[in-house]
């Protein structure tokens, strides 16, 4: 069995795409996934499967959610070990214990590249945020106190960008790696 993480984009945000996590767990278990658990209330799912095809698993989860909850949300599936390896490559300024920075990882959904997303968003605001592209993800940190001045903060939800990405905090990702 392979341990996976599924990131459902835009679940339980501002009253939209409401999906109760216990019901999501039951839905995905019924769809044939094993050892399903959720983390937080924002569409983070851990599961096991013998299927090595992440694209097929993405389709299975997306169809199950659409059928059960009537919402069509983008889904990104990554092996738990892949996420751990990815976080090990994080720049030294990302994911620190400091409270002055807010550290996020932007996952780019299939059909777009991290370079394309970064180009659409534009350069980070000097002195307020940092970005580093690593494959299909972007490590992103910004100053908590001055986030409103961050060019990336204002732009990640914009049409033409927001639907191509899903974002998780460093702390959430660490939890997803630590959960067995």
Image: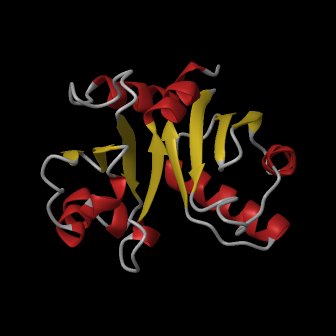
What percent of the width, then of the height, locates residue 52? 53, 40
**Relative to residue 155, is residue 24 depicted above or below?**
above
Q: Kindly identify the residue that appears in the image at 46 percent across and 40 percent down.
A: 169
Q: Position of residue 41 (x, y in %)?
A: 71, 46
Q: Indicate the colouring scheme.
A: secondary structure
The picture quadrant where one finds residue 156 is bottom left
Q: Nearer the viewer, residue 3 or 145?
A: 145
**Quadrant holding the N terminus:** top right
Left or right relative to 48: residue 142:
left
57 and 139: which is toward the camera: 139
Residue 176: percent from left, percent from top: 57, 30
Relative to the observer, which residue lies in front, 42 or 62? Answer: 42
Residue sitting at x 32%, y 51%: 146
Q: Residue at x 49, y 33 (%)?
A: 173
Q: Residue at x 35, y 28 (%)?
A: 95
Give the residue furthest to the front: 145
Q: Quadrant of the C terminus?
A: top right
């Amino acid at each position: 069995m392979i341990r996976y993480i599924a990131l459902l984009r835009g679940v339980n945000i501002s009253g939209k795409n409401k999906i109760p996590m216990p019901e999501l767990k039951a839905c995905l278990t019924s769809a044939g996934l094993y050892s399903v658990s959720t983390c937080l209330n924002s569409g983070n799912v851990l599961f096991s499967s013998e299927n090595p095809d992440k694209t097929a698993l993405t389709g299975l989860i997306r169809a199950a959610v659409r059928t059960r909850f009537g919402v069509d949300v983008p889904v990104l599936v990554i092996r738990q070990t892949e996420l751990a390896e990815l976080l090990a490559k994080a720049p030294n300024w990302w994911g620190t214990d400091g409270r002055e920075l807010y550290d996020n990882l932007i996952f780019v959904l299939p059909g777009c590249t991290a370079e394309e997303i970064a180009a659409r968003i534009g350069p980070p605001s000097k002195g307020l945020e940092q970005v580093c592209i690593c494959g299909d993800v972007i490590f992103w940190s910004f100053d908590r106190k001055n986030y409103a001045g961050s060019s990336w903060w204002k732009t990640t939800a914009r049409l033409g960008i927001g639907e191509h990405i899903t974002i998780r905090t460093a702390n959430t990702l660490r939890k997803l790696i630590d959960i067995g």
